[in-house]
C-alpha cells in the first residue's frame, strides 16, 4: 500500500490538561504504530498551551491530545494558522464539543434526548433544583470524569460543587440517569460497533476508567436499541460539525432512549482505548486505524 505521507508526522501528545498522562500513552502508542508501518513519526510533547516547535520536514500533525489545548479548538486554530493538516475536527467543532452545556443545546435542538441540566456558577446563587437526587455534578468542559461527583442527598451538593469548581466556574448538575452506558465511535464515515461500559461500582469515574480492573467493556453488546443509539450519535456528531473521528457517550434508558452525554472529538488512542477496541472489532487494527486518521487529515490538503 502507498504511504499516505512521506514527510515527518508530528505526533502531538502530553498537553497541559489534567488528561496529560493518558495523552502520553496515546501518543507513544500512535507514534510506535505509525513507525511500524514505515512512517517517520516523531513524538512532540506539548508542555504548555501553545504550539511547540515542530520537527523539520513536518507534513502533518497527529493529535494525541485531550482536554484543554488539545481537544478544545485552541491547538486546532494554531495549526490552521500554520497551514498544517491535522487529525480530527476543526477549531469550532472542537470548542463546541468540549462545552457540555453548549453542545447539549445543539443536541436538543436536533431532537435528541439530553440530561436535564442546571448550571451552577461559582459565586452566584443556585436556585431550587427541579429534580430529586441522586445527581451527577461535573465541570462544564473537562474530560476523563475529572471533578465529577455522584450526589446522593441535597446536603452533599456543596462539596460536590466545590470539587467541580476546582476546574472552572461553571458546574453542571444533572439527574443521575439509570440505564446502560454505551459509547459509539466513528472513523471517517464508518460507525463502529457500540461499546458498553460496565463500571463495577458507582459510575464511570476516573478510577473506573483508568485504574479499576473490575470495569468491563462489551464490544457489540446485545442491545435492542443499538441502531437508535448509532442514529442519535450520528446526529450529535453532525450537529456539532465534527469530522473524521469521535466517540459519542450515551446512556440508554430502560425504555431504550439514548440520552446523549457528550461527544469526544479526540477519544483516547492508547492501544486498549475504547475507540481502538471498537475499530479492531470492525476489522481496522490499531496501526491501520492510526494510518486511516492520517489519511483523512491529508485528504484535506490543497482544499
Ligand atoms: N447524568 C448522568 N447520569 C448518569 N451518569 C452520568 C451522567 N453524566 C455523566 N455520567 C457518568 O460519568 C461519566 C463521565 O461523564 P461524561 O459526561 O461523559 O464526561 P467526561 O468528559 O468526563 O467523560 C459517564 O461516562 C457516566 O458514567
Ligand atoms: Mg465521557
Image (cartoon, rainbow, N blue to C red):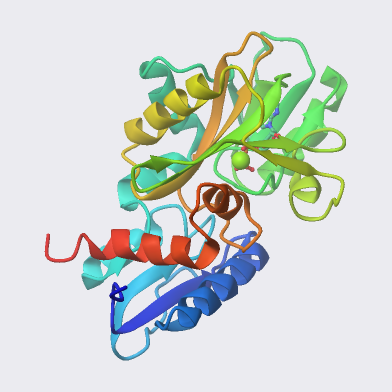
Q: Residue at x 56, y 67 (%)?
A: 16
Residue 7 shows in this picture: yes
Q: Residue 289 in the image: x percent, y percent?
A: 46, 60
**2 relative to 194, above or below:** below
Name the one closer to the observer, 175 or 272. 272
- Residue that sits furthest to the bottom in the current view: 56
User: Residue 66 is drawn in which quadrant?
Assistant: bottom right
Quadrant for the C terminus in the image: bottom left
| In this rendering, position of residue 109 left or right of residue 68 | left
Point out the quarter of the image occupied by ligand 1.
top right
Which residue is the extreme one toward the left?
302
Foreground residue among 221 and 196: 221
Position of 149 compared to 260: left or right?
Answer: right
Which of these two is toward me, 140 or 1?
Answer: 1
Residue at x 73%, y 21% (from the top left corner): 176
- Side (left or right) of 200 relative to 246: right
Query: In terms of depth relative to the viewer, which is nearer, 235 or 23?
Result: 235
Residue 273 lies, in percent from the top left, at: 63, 55
Is residue 227 depicted above or below 78 in this figure?
A: above
Residue 174: image location, x then y, percent: 66, 22
Q: Quadrant of residue 251?
A: top right
Q: Residue at x 28, y 75 (%)?
A: 2
Amino acid at each position: 500500500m502507498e504511504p499516505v505521507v512521506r514527510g515527518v508526522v508530528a505526533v502531538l501528545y502530553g498537553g497541559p490538561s489534567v488528561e496529560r498522562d493518558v495523552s502520553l500513552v496515546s501518543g507513544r502508542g500512535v507514534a510506535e504504530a505509525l513507525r511500524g508501518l514505515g512512517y517517520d513519526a516523531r513524538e512532540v510533547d506539548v508542555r504548555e498551551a501553545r504550539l511547540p516547535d515542530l520537527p523539520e520536514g513536518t507534513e502533518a500533525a497527529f493529535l494525541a491530545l485531550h482536554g484543554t489545548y488539545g481537544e478544545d479548538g485552541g491547538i486546532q486554530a494554531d495549526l490552521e494558522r500554520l497551514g498544517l493538516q491535522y487529525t480530527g475536527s476543526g477549531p469550532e467543532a472542537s470548542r463546541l464539543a468540549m462545552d457540555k452545556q453548549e453542545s447539549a443545546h445543539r443536541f436538543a435542538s436536533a431532537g435528541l434526548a439530553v440530561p436535564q441540566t442546571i448550571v451552577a456558577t461559582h459565586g452566584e446563587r443556585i436556585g431550587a433544583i427541579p429534580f430529586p437526587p441522586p445527581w451527577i455534578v461535573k465541570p462544564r468542559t473537562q474530560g476523563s470524569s475529572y471533578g465529577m461527583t455522584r450526589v446522593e442527598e441535597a446536603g452533599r451538593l456543596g462539596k460536590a460543587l466545590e470539587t467541580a469548581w476546582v476546574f472552572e466556574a461553571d458546574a453542571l448538575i444533572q439527574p443521575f440517569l439509570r440505564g446502560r452506558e454505551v459509547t459509539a465511535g466513528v472513523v471517517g464515515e464508518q460507525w463502529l460497533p457500540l461499546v458498553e461500559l460496565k463500571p463495577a461500582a458507582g459510575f464511570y469515574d476516573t478510577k473506573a476508567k483508568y485504574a479499576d480492573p473490575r470495569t468491563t467493556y462489551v464490544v457489540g453488546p446485545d442491545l435492542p436499541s443499538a441502531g437508535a443509539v448509532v442514529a442519535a450519535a450520528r446526529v450529535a456528531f453532525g450537529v456539532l460539525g465534527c469530522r473524521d473521528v469521535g466517540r459519542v457517550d450515551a446512556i440508554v434508558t430502560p425504555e431504550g432512549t439514548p440520552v446523549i452525554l457528550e461527544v469526544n472529538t479526540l477519544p483516547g488512542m492508547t492501544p486498549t482505548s475504547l475507540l481502538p477496541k471498537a475499530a479492531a472489532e470492525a476489522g481496522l487494527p490499531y496501526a491501520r486505524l492510526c494510518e486511516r486518521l492520517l489519511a483523512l487529515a491529508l485528504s484535506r490538503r490543497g482544499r
